[in-house]
Image (cartoon, rainbow, N blue to C red):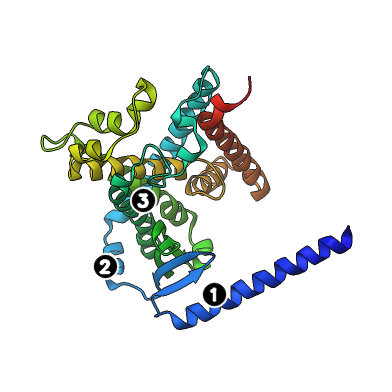
Amino acid sequence: MERGTEDRRDRFDGLQRRVEALERRLNAALPRPLKVGAGVLYLHTTRGSDRLDALADRPCWVRWGDLAIALTLAVQAAALALVTAGAVVALGRDRATALNEPANTVAIPGLNEFIPVAAAGYVVAALVAATVVHEGGHAVACRRAGVPVREWGVALLFGVVPLAAYVLTGDELDDAPRRARLRVYAAAVANNLVLAGVAFLVLLAPVTASPMDAYLTYFGWALTGGGPPTPAAVAALGPVTNLAFWTALLSANVGLLNALPVSVLDGGRVRSLSLAALADRADAPLSGRTRRAVVNAAGAFAVVAVVLAVFGPLLPV
């Protein structure tokens, strides 16, 4: 038994070394803005941006960062209440709908019944906008705090599907003042909510279909007993409505998801730093271990609530 386990481990290690060697050869051959890793293509740059620094120099970002902290904490409470209510409702349902199908939890056009291939362009564009605005919030807040941005770019799964924009900072972020770090993490969430709000306002304009029309086209059928959206139904909404609808939906989801008090998300970091600030203000400092325990407990609750809200009706009674 032990010999077989060692053989499998050796084969896995050998495969991993070959994959890493292949990635090194590919990265050596690719032009400088591109690199690959684990099936992901990165379009990136390590150069700074004068425009980014000029934008970050504006004093309004300090006020926006402070407002973003309060907004993120408020949205975090609302998001926890929302997923908790969703879990309770889901567990009380007698039957599952297409909303609870595992395949429909992944935003892949064609695989997800709510996202037909005809809507793929709008979904990709909206996802890129949501992630760029999110990571842009991190980048501007970092530069405002004097924290260098080592690398930034866009990650593309298999070189085609946009996964996320990203920003890599140096260790200087860990040494930045607590308030500055709070602004860095909270600004991204707040930016997503602002983008979602702007997109929703576009849906209220006379030149677009109403938000309810778009919702019923893409999601309402799962509750009314109709069928998935067809290419004709997507075309009938028009390009502006489609783009605004998916931008509002995906940007709001990115913001709400990142606001949850999960340690690896922005909301978890904001919660941990806020607890430390409140404890210091009350002259009762909390240890890092205690703060991690509180955040991890809240994060575990949030994750369980999300899972139950999505898959609750599929669980055996």
Image vertical order of residue 204 relative to residue 13, above or below: above
Q: Is residue 196 visible?
A: no
- Mark closest to the chain's N terminus, 1 or 3: 1
| Count of labels in the image | 3
Callout 1 environment at 10 Å: few (<14), some (14 to 19), or many (20+)?
A: some
Would you say 317 lies left or right of 145 here? right
* Residue projecting furthest to the left: 206
Measure the C-alpha gap from mark 2 to mark 1: 36 Å
Residue 286 in the image, given as x and y percentages of width and height: 63, 45
Quick one: quadrant of the C terminus? top right
Q: Which residue is denoted by mark 1 in the rendering?
A: 23
Q: What residue is rendered at 77% in x and 69% in y?
A: 10
What secondary structure is marked by label 2? helix
Q: What residue is rendered at 27% in x and 54% in y?
A: 60
Numbered disc in front, either 2 or 1: 1
Callout 2 environment at 10 Å: few (<14), some (14 to 19), or many (20+)?
A: few
Q: Which residue is denoted by mark 3 in the rendering?
A: 65
Would you say 272 lies left or right of 115 here? right
Quick one: quadrant of the N terminus? bottom right
Residue 307 in the image, given as x and y percentages of width and height: 55, 34
What secondary structure is marked by label 3? helix
Q: What residue is rendered at 39% in x and 37% in y?
A: 113
Q: Amino acid at mark 3?
A: Gly
| Nearest to the observer: residue 74 or residue 100 | 100
Q: Is residue 269 visible?
A: yes
Measure the C-alpha gap from mark 1 to mark 3: 39 Å
Measure the C-alpha gap from mark 2 to mark 3: 17 Å
| Nearest to the observer: residue 160 or residue 171 | 160
Indicate the quadrant where residue 15 lies. bottom right
- Mark closest to the chain's N terminus, 2 or 3: 2
Residue 304 in the image, given as x and y percentages of width and height: 59, 34
